[in-house]
Amino acid sequence: MREQTQVVAMQNLADIGIGIEIQNGSYDIFWNSYGEGGPIATGQFDIAQWSDSSDFPDPNEDQWLCSEIPSEDSPAGANWYGICDEELNALVQAQALEMDPDKRIELFHDIGKIITEKVYWVGVWHDNDVWSINRHTGNIKVSGANPFWNCWEWDVY
């Protein structure tokens, strides 16, 4: 799926005069950390494609923090995008401290708006997850975005 998507992206970019060379490294190198010289963690790319999802069951997104950009001082940093946006950084920090669920939802909408408008990340496809629910549980409302979104309301019989 990933390689097919890359070919389509290459063709679409060629239509507007942008040429790209597709390079797919082996997984044992591609996903190496900054300290191990991994090409993504060290920023050795112009455009990169990988699967990503928020932390379940909480959608905390610390990989957008400026302090998470991998470096010599922080080789385990999770911000492989290498983006430091002060407004986005402040919103990510605020959501991590906010206890009111409605205010947190609003903060995540603001986070999503910045990521979308500044084209920091583009969703290409959605990998469907399959979840099974034990018959001894109730009030589970599976969401397409996060199956745990109402876990505080679940019942066990």
Image (cartoon, rainbow, N blue to C red):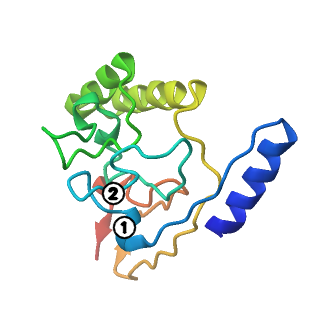
Alpha carbon of mark 1 to alpha carbon of mark 2: how far? 6 Å
- Depth check, front residue: 118 or 112: 118
Q: Where, quadrant-wise, is the C terminus in this rendering?
A: bottom left
Q: Secondary structure at mark 2?
A: loop
Q: Residue type at mark 1: give it.
A: Ile
Q: Secondary structure at mark 1?
A: helix
Residue at x 42% of width, y 71% of height: 27
Q: Where, quadrant-wise, is the N terminus in this rendering?
A: bottom right
Q: Give percent across and percent down for residue 92.
A: 31, 29
Q: Give percent across and percent down for residue 145.
A: 51, 53
Q: What label sits on residue 29 in the rendered view?
A: 1
Q: Residues within 10 Å of mark 2 (few under 14, many from 20)?
A: some
Residue at x 39% of width, y 69% of height: 138
Left or right side of 50 for 90: left
Q: From this viewpoint, which residue is outermost toward the left?
A: 73
In which image quadrant can residue 62 be found? top left
Q: From this viewpoint, which residue is outermost toward the bottom?
A: 135
Residue 1 lies, with reference to residue 20, above or below; the image says: below
Give yes or no for contact between labels 1 and 2 (Cβ–Cβ under 8 Å): yes
In which image quadrant can residue 144 be found? bottom right
Q: From this viewpoint, which residue is outermost toward the right?
A: 15
- Depth check, front residue: 111 or 99: 111
Q: Residue type at mark 2: give it.
A: Gly
Q: Give percent across and percent down for residue 127.
A: 57, 65
Q: Give percent across and percent down for residue 103.
A: 35, 26
Reading the chain from its start, which is encountered first: label 1 or label 2? Answer: 1
Q: Which residue is mark 2?
A: 38
Left or right side of 135 for 99: left
Q: Residues within 10 Å of mark 1 (few under 14, many from 20)?
A: few
Residue at x 65% of width, y 52% of height: 124
